[in-house]
Amino acid sequence: MKILVCISNVPDTTSKINFTADNKEFDKNGVQFVINPWDEYALTRAIELKEAKGGTVTVLNVGEADAEPNIRKALAIGADDAIRVNANPKDAFFVAQQITAVAKENNYDMILMGKESIDYNGSQVHNMVGEMLGIPSIVPAFKLDLVDDNTAVLEREIEGGKEVVEVKLPFIASAQQPMSEPRIPNMRGIMTARTKPLAVREPVGADVKADYVNFSKPEKKSGVKMIDPENAGDLIKLLRNEAKVL
Amino acid sequence: MSVLVFVEGLNGEVKKSSLEAASYGSQVAQQLGTTTTAIAIGDVQEAALAKLGEQGVSKVLYDGDSRLNQFIADAYVKVIAKAVQQENAKVLVFSNSNIGAAVGAKLAVRLNGSLATNVTALPTIDGGSFVVTRGVFSGKAFADVALTSDLKIVAIKKNSIDITSGGGSATVENFSADLADADFAVSPKETVMQDTNGGVLLPEAAIVVSGGRGLKGPENWHLVEDLAKELGAATACSKPVSDMDWRPHHEHVGQTGITVSPNLYIAIGISGAIQHLAGVNSSKVIVVINKDPEAPFFKAADYGIVGDAFEIVPKIIEAAKALDK
């Protein structure tokens, strides 16, 4: 079983989000980066499948050198090797083309990633890769099991419910809670991660189709209006007459 | 040239999120001086489709193949791609649902289009440039994105576009993409719809009532459910509540759960951890009820009540019952 897990390097959930003075780019200054939380569900499930059935887990990141601490963290959690495509990921289409190029050179049995990244919230890359490779994409999945060496069964969220899908390998799936319980690397994992292979390759020539021209932040709330708990029912009047949402 | 809107049906009706997409599409068509066509599939009545004229749609293409009642990505892509070509569509509009985002991404590859998901506002169109605003950084920021391909594909965040009305009636035409069995190769073995007790589905809801650990146990959820029922709202919960199995996972909103952006979000007994805020911070109005005056959620709220949920919520339910609906 050869599994490819794609990870994004994203600002920690608690980060204050700022942009450069001209609002053209995200300001990385003082920001702690983590493995995209959704990708951790994919990574952990891949490692669980490897532990149960044998095989290898390769992690792939499309990013610059500053992503390497988190790639090493994925290796410490239990991936076997890593590939970094050395590029500033410009849009989903660009990233999907990089993943597709790597996938075409290696016959992965499955490609997993999170259902979206918490920075750009695009939820596009998995389906784009599936379309580029001509393999099924099952998104967003919260359960993934192997039936046999050629078949997997997944449960995925649909609007207002869930579906059970059986699919032949190879396929691509995006992960969400509760597919697995993300792990914290242990000391042995951290030591062995240092010597696991991390290959760096240059991007394939790829189009950018969505050009980020400007960033802005939402208007600050004007402040909270407190209501006397004795007269809690007044809330309903305020919601109707003042906020106009009822 | 035209604007094409993908319309999802549910129980014979057009989904609310698709009415938003149609309203968006018609306003874009007006800017471009062209017409709006809808492509509809699945379980939806002809009369409901004709009413899309209210939102400015002039023509609806309807593929009634019953195999399309389930979401089969490859089949959907084929139907919509054919409609794009037939209508010479330059702008393709989806709701940012699980279906819209997925099919949009596949079509962007197949038809060489530019895609923006999670779009929150009408585009700025200036000569050849087409710039949309989309939500990024889990509700903490917006990005303006120029879509540079000939075909622009947008998926509209739910509850971010007002549903327009006052148009006419749309003509409904039968449409077929001559789907083969192979297009349904990856089909679900089983589909299980959530029991909403006649209530509202969380991702579609304009109002959400949500409960946290402050409710002390699943046996107290009638407070959340009764208030939701009075307001026509969907119910939701915080991560600890779903982790403890008080409530199902599909109700969990937050960083690793569902992201919602209703007009009104009422949080009962939720402290407002930053991971929770990431899932709700684009709600238009937030009400926080918590016994701890220092709960961080109050900083993100529009209205707050400090006190015991078990005393406060019944008072609000009473007031909601008295409301002239």
Image: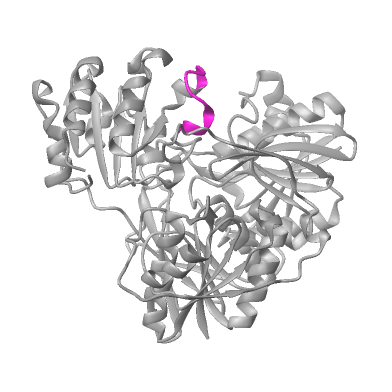
| Left or right: residue B192 compared with residue A54 | left
Nearest the eye: B112 or A64: B112
* Whether residue B270 can be seen here: no
Furthest-right residue in view?
Answer: A149
Nearest the eye: A216 or B200: B200
Nearest the eye: A133 or B63: B63
| Left or right: residue B107 compared with residue B7 | right
| Left or right: residue B221 compared with residue B250 | left
Residue in the image at 71% along x and 61% along y: B75
Quarter of the image for residue B287 reads top left
The image position of residue B170, as x and y in percent, is 45, 75
The image position of residue B200, as x and y in percent, is 42, 40
Residue B186 lies in the magenta-colored region: no
Quarter of the image for residue A15 reads top left
Q: Quadrant of the C terminus of chain B?
A: top left
Residue B250 lies in the magenta-colored region: yes
B189 relative to B91, above or below: above
Please, which colouring scheme is shown? one colour
The image position of residue A7, as x and y in percent, is 63, 44
The image position of residue A234, as x and y in percent, is 11, 32
Q: Magenta span covers which residues?
A: B243-252
Nearest the eye: B210 or A98: B210
B199 relative to B114, above or below: above
Q: Main secondary structure of the magenta part?
A: loop
Count numbered badges in the picture.
0
Residue in the image at 86% along x and 28% along y: A53
* Whether residue A65 can be seen here: yes
